[in-house]
Image (spheres, rainbow, N blue to C red):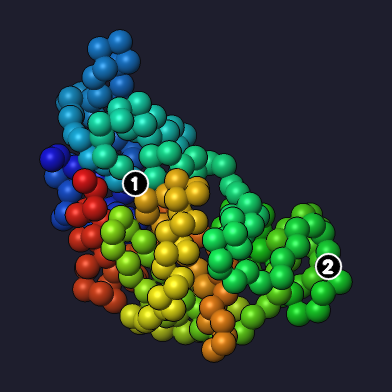
Amino acid sequence: MTALLFGQMSDPNIAALRSHFDLFVDQSQNLHWDITTDTLTVDGHEINFNASFGRANVFAENNWTMYANAYLISNYVRAHPNIKQYNPNYEQETPYKLKNLVLAKQCGLHVPDTEAGIETGRPDTIIKPITGGAHAAHGSRADYPVILQQRIDGLNKRLFVIGDDIFVFGLASTHLDYRDDPNPALFVSEIDHAIVPQVRKLMGKINLTFGAADFIDDGNKTWFLEINSSPMFAAFNNVVAGKLAESLRANLK
C-alpha cells in the first residue's frame, strides 16, 4: 500500500508523520488533476497512491494556492473510494458542535448545562464559539451568538480514537483554556471504561473513524466537552514516544 501525506513540514503534526508515509506533497506545490484522464500530477510528475492523510497548515498564512490545493487533493481522494482515509463520510466543513452535544447525551455521556445565544442567566459560565476554534473565555454575555456552558473545574482529558486504538491523556494547566498555556503538563492518563464505547457510539453517529474527544474530570464525573474530527496531536505523540503517529499510519487500512 502506497500512502500519501499532504500538508507542510512546518506543521508539527505533519512532521511527526512524515517518516511513516511513502509520498509527501507540500501544500504549496503545483497540483494538477485532469479529470478526463483521471491523472493527478505534482510539479508535472504523475503520482498514484491508495492511502492518504492530510492537514491544511493552520500554522502558516494560507494563500489561495495552498487553500485551493487542500480542496483539490481532498476532492481527488473523496472521488476515489478505493483510497483509504480517515473520516471519509464526515463533512468537516459543516460545524455541528451543538448537535454533537445532543448526540453525546443520547450516547450516555455527561454533558454540562449548555445554552446557545447571546447571554445566559446561569452563574459561572464560559463562552465558546459555535463554530471555529476560538479559545474559551469567562463570561455570560457576548456580542453575537455563542455557546454558553457551565464551568466545571477539574482535570482536562483528551481521548484519541484511531481506528481500533485508544490513547488517553491528561492535561494539567492553570489556564481556563489549556491552549493559552505555553507549557501545559501532558501525560498518559486513564478514563472510565464505560466512556470508550459511548464515544465510539457517538463517532459512529457522525461518521468518524479518527477523532479526539475532550473531557473534564471533576473527581466525581467525567464531563464531555466536544469532539474534534481533525485534532492536533504532535505534543501528545511526543508523550508516547511516537506511538500515536505509528497508529495513525497503521490504521489506514
Amino acid type of the residue tagged 2 in the rendering:
Thr
Can the viewer see residue 214? yes
Residue at the spot x=79%, y=62% of the render?
142
What kind of element bears circle 2? loop
Amino acid type of the residue tagged 1 in the rendering:
Tyr
User: Mark 2 or mark 1: which comes first in sequence?
Assistant: 1
Assign the N terminus to one quadrant of the image.
Answer: top left
Residue at the spot x=54%, y=89% of the render?
219
Q: Residue 243, position in %: x, y?
A: 22, 67
Residue at the spot x=75%, y=58% of the render?
116
85 in relation to 73, above or below: below
Residue at the spot x=37%, y=51% of the render?
209
Left or right, 22 with respect to 180, comes to left
- Asked if the residue under mark 1 is in contact with the one under mark 2, i.e. CB atoms within 8 Å, the reply is no
Q: Residue 231, position in %: x, y?
A: 42, 58
Can the viewer see residue 72? no
Q: Residue 253, position in %: x, y?
A: 21, 46
Separation (CA) of disc 2 from disc 1:
37 Å
Residue 120: give its label.
Answer: 2
Residue that numbered label 1 is attached to: 86
Q: Residues within 10 Å of mark 1 (few under 14, many from 20)?
A: many
